[in-house]
């Protein structure tokens, strides 16, 4: 089971986390949307916490919000802190494998990270992930995964895992969920 987002009670109290609170409050709103999150992740002191080779995109921000909250498209302060903590967790795993700090890891490192994050994925699913999220400089080069693609993947896997857990019932065998066609389309469009 993957590392779950932390709720505000599991973290140090928000009042002692003044850095994130100040960053959040700089938007002068009680809740922030994907555009605000994009600004906070790329254009504040917070951006120095992440990979210097990459920038977050609006798609990253939409996925990150969906991974933490499903019923709305905005984040409150505790939800923002959860997003940042997820990013810190993912960043730390990525950095352990990005030894030369170039913002790129090998596919085997991605598999190790996903296993460490407790995403229980089959070899065929891992193969699909590597094909989708890796890039090559040319036809002769080895596949590599950038930090941006890695964040997208982690957010999607977290979102999928959370939604699947919501859909599974206690009386169904483990790892089985049922969706209506409309629910499946909504899930697919969220990704």
Image (cartoon, helix red, strand yellow):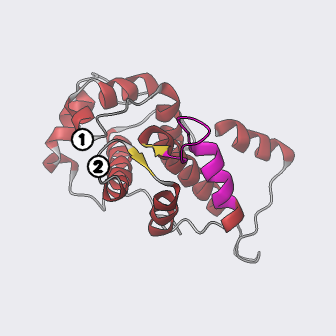
Residue placed under numbered mark 1 in the picture: 49
Mark 2 neighbour class, 10 Å CA radius: few under 14, some 14 to 19, many 20 or more: few
Q: Is residue 165 left or right of residue 35?
A: right
Task: Tell me where the magenta segment starts and ends, as one range.
Answer: 125-144
* The one of 32 and 3 positioned closer to us in this rendering: 3
Cα distance, mark 2 to mark 1?
17 Å
Query: Mark 1 falls on what kind of element?
Result: helix
Q: Name the side, left or right, on which 70 lies relative to 181.
A: left
Q: Nearer the viewer, residue 47 or 22?
A: 47
Residue 99, how many percent across, how many down? 30, 54
Residue 143 lies within the magenta run: yes
Foreground residue among 4 and 28: 4
Dot 2: what SS? loop
Residue 100, labelled with which disc? 2
Q: State left or right for residue 179 relative to residue 159.
A: right
Which is more foreground, mark 2 or mark 1? 2
Image vertical order of residue 3 relative to residue 149, above or below: below
- Label 1 crowding class (10 Å Cα cut-off): few <14, some 14-19, many 20+? few
Q: Name, please, the residue furthest toward the front.
A: 140
Residue at the image position 56 percent from the left and 39 percent from the top:
136
Residue 151 % position (x, y): 46, 44
The residue shown at (85%, 45%) is 181
Query: Could you say which quadrant of the image residue 4 lies in?
Result: bottom left
- Marks 2/1 in contact by CB < 8 Å: the verdict is no
Residue plotted at (33% across, 44% down): 84
User: Is residue 190 in sight in this rendering?
Assistant: yes
Q: Is residue 188 magenta?
A: no
For residue 185, above or below residue 125: above
Q: Which image quarter is the C terminus in?
A: top right
Q: Residue furthest right?
A: 181
- The disc, 2 or 1, on the residue closer to the chain's N-terminal end is 1
Q: Which mark is residue 114?
A: none
């Amino acid at each position: 089971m993957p590392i779950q987002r932390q709720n505000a009670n599991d973290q140090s109290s928000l009042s002692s986390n003044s850095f994130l609170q100040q960053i959040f409050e700089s938007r002068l709103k009680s809740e922030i949307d994907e555009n605000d999150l994009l600004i906070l992740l790329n254009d504040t002191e917070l951006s120095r916490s992440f990979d210097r080779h990459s920038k977050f995109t609006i798609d990253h921000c939409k996925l990150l919000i969906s991974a933490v909250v499903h019923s709305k498209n905005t984040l409150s302060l505790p939800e923002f802190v959860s997003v940042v903590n997820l990013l810190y967790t993912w960043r730390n795993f990525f950095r352990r494998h990005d030894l030369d700090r170039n913002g790129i890891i090998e596919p085997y490192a991605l598999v190790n990270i996903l296993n460490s994050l407790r995403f229980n994925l089959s070899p065929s699913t891992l193969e699909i992930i590597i094909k989708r999220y890796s890039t090559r400089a040319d036809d002769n080069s080895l596949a590599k995964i950038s930090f941006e693609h890695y964040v997208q993947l982690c957010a999607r896997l977290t979102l999928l895992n959370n939604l699947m857990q919501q859909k599974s019932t206690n009386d169904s065998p483990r790892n089985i969920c049922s969706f209506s066609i409309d629910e499946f389309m909504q899930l697919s469009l969220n990704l």
